[in-house]
Amino acid sequence: MNEAEIRKIVENTVSALKTKKEMTLSLAERLCDAVLCEARRIGVKAVVCISDGAGNPRLVKSMDDAYIASYDVAVGKAYTVVALKMSTKKLSALAQPGQSLYGIQFTNGGKIVIFGGGEPLLGENGRIIGGLGVSGGTEEQDTALSAFGARYFETQM
């Protein structure tokens, strides 16, 4: 991450609204840029999707040379966390054979993703205003990047 990228993120964050009532494009851009900077830092060519509170994509950015398949996966993760009101990491445990949500990935037209890399984004009073989906690395890397994004959103925006 270079100085110009850091400066841009800090300036955008400082100018952000104090309250988060809805997922605006500006809010999505600031969060996405922070996650992409972190992805560069750890060496992951990621696709990042920020959805609104209905699970519809507000912004998707793909790093150069990211996997083509990561686009749909990132969008699916951003949808999943809003639709089911939990991280995809938590859902992963519940969707294993013998668990209460086994087979859920076959519902909702196949849009449900059951492995880590997605986090719900909370606004005022803990209401979900959007979702974050990251794809491109290992499940552990995607989970770490989405957790980074959720923390960034909560503390910096």
Image: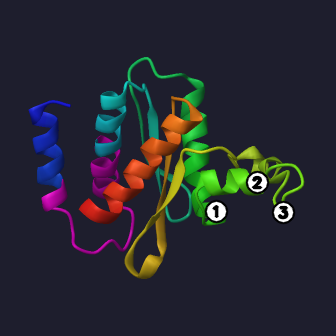
Q: Residues within 10 Å of mark 2 (few under 14, many from 20)?
A: few
Estimate the x, y position of residue 75 in percent, counting from the top left.
56, 43
Find the distance from the CA under tag 3 to the CA under tag 1: 17 Å
Residue closest to the eye, 125 or 100: 100
3 or 2: mark nearer the eye: 3
Q: Which residue is mark 2?
A: 108
Tell me whether the residue at label 1 lies in contact with that at label 2, contact meaning CB atoms closer than 8 angstroms.
yes
Q: Which residue is mark 1?
A: 83
Label 3 SS:
loop
How many marks do you count on the picture? 3
Q: Which residue is mark 3?
A: 100
Label 1 SS:
helix
Find the distance from the CA under tag 1 to the CA under tag 2: 10 Å
Mark 1 and mark 2 lie on one chain; the one further toward the N terminus is 1
Indicate the quadrant containing the C terminus: top left, top right, bottom left or bottom right.
bottom left
Residue displayed at 56% across by 64% down: 54
Q: Specify the label residue 38 is tagged with.
A: none
Indicate the quadrant containing the N terminus: top left, top right, bottom left or bottom right.
top left
**Extent of the magenta region:** 13-33
